[in-house]
Image (cartoon, rainbow, N blue to C red):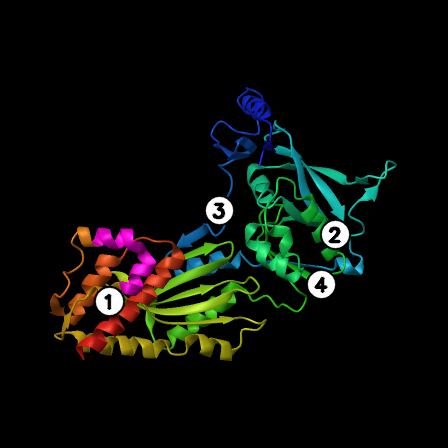
Amino acid sequence: MLNHGTDVPELLAQLDRLTTTTKSVIKDTDKVVLECNVGDGIQSWTVRNGSCSLPDGAVVKKGTSFNGFQEAIETLDKGMYMSPGDGEPCYVLCHASTKPVRVSRNIISNWYCLSTDGAFYVGKDLQPRFDIIELSLNDWEFSQMMQTKLAIMYEDIVYPITMSAISSVGSLMDCNSAFKRIDDCQLGSAILLTEKLAYMNKVQLVYRESSSKIRPLMAVAGGTYVHIPLNEFFRKIHDKISERHLFKAERWSITDSGAKLEMRFIPDNNLGIQVKASDLPGCAMSITAFALVGGHKVALHTNSVVHRGRLVKASLDTLYGGIEESFETFKETRDKMVSKECVFTSDLLSNILKIIGKKRMNTAKEDGHLPEGGAKMDAWELFEALVNGTHFQVPEKQAFDLMRAYKSLQDEIAGRCF
């Protein structure tokens, strides 16, 4: 955020300042985002830089080589202990203001600095007073600091509280109310966080190394939480699958919050496994067996566990339980469906309709991608036609729901024709 307010003339003046030829906070190639709350006229406004923020969960790295995947996740795992309750100096920072011009290409901003030894002091006028520090940040560092406008400073390193960290910070410190809304000024939330931190011992800060002074905070955890490196988890999964299959890494992606790896078997590359994992507290690790039907994934079986500090053999066995059996069941069902006749009725698509919505379903019908009601078809061909006809690009969660719905569809068609 660059500035905010409620007065419209002030807004126009601010926009005018951003278009001058001075060293503006906005560079020539940047986008400016103007947000207004409108009621009876403009009630409030915010001007922010829209070009340097990385969306929460955005892909940081991706590829197709398993060795490249291993190398990429090696760089993710970072953590730090602190014990403000034992008297260690720790501070909560809260955004106060940003100067409209750059200094040596950096953005200059002022931050309330609240110590866990005492968030504020009382002045001679009996009003609370806060220490303020000035930070000189590059574009990326500033965008991370402005996600929630709150940060923790420990040993001269600043840990911005990102949107990814909100859940764990709120739960561990019992202060979810601090993040119910992101206000223009987060000073009240900063005071609450400072009070909570002052009595906490052995707090773990889980972060991703980013710069010499700014480390975006992905999660916080208690002293008993044992961090499991992602590279260790994926290496053990790799060894587990290697006992049964030859495979290749089809694709992988890494975000700040976790990693996803898709593997296809050799020689039957229509079967594979999708593995998702995160090293952040409270996040599950999961394995999904899938089959490709018309090039689209059908989820055959999914297991997930939340790690509790140790990656033991029992956890791996639980994750992999039922995976191999699901492949055999799928192939047996597929073979039985071939040459079996089934009648198409619209109720077969009721679960899929809930996921893709009426608009997409109507588009599929209008474009002739779905059979007519009452049509008699080979059961397997009907299944393929319905998967191909109802597959759309949807957000990740909906895509996974669609994968599972296709498995239910196969079971329903198989049940009708046997």
Left or right? Give the position of 366 relative to 179. Answer: left
Give me the C-alpha separation between circle 2 and circle 1.
59 Å
Give me the C-alpha separation between circle 1 and circle 4.
54 Å
Earlier residue among tags 1 and 4: 4
Amino acid at the residue labelled 4: Lys
- The reply to whether the magenta stretch includes residue 357 is yes
Q: Few, some or many C-alpha atoms within 10 Å of disc 1 (few <14, some 14-19, many ≥20)? A: some
Magenta region: 350-364
Q: Residue at x 66, y 57 (%)?
A: 175
Q: Few, some or many C-alpha atoms within 10 Å of disc 3 (few <14, some 14-19, many ≥20)? A: few
Give me the C-alpha separation between circle 4 and circle 3.
30 Å
Q: Which residue is mark 2?
A: 90
Q: Is 302 or 60 nearer to us in this picture?
A: 302
Q: Which residue is mark 3?
A: 55
Image height of 290 relative to 31, above or below: below
The image shows residue 369 at horizontal and vertical percentages of 18, 56
Earlier residue among tags 3 and 1: 3
> Residue furthest toward the front?
40
Earlier residue among tags 3 and 2: 3
Question: Which of label 4 and label 3 is nearer to you?
Answer: 3
The image shows residue 110 at horizontal and vertical percentages of 69, 36
Q: Few, some or many C-alpha atoms within 10 Å of disc 2 (few <14, some 14-19, many ≥20)? A: many
Give me the C-alpha separation between circle 3 and circle 1.
37 Å
Tell me the quarter of the image containing the C terminus: bottom left
Q: Which residue is mark 1?
A: 348
The image shows residue 265 at horizontal and vertical percentages of 31, 69
Q: Few, some or many C-alpha atoms within 10 Å of disc 4 (few <14, some 14-19, many ≥20)? A: some
Report if the CB atoms under discs 2 and 4 are less than 8 Å apart.
Answer: no
Residue 124 occupies quadrant? top right
Tell me the quarter of the image containing the N terminus: top right
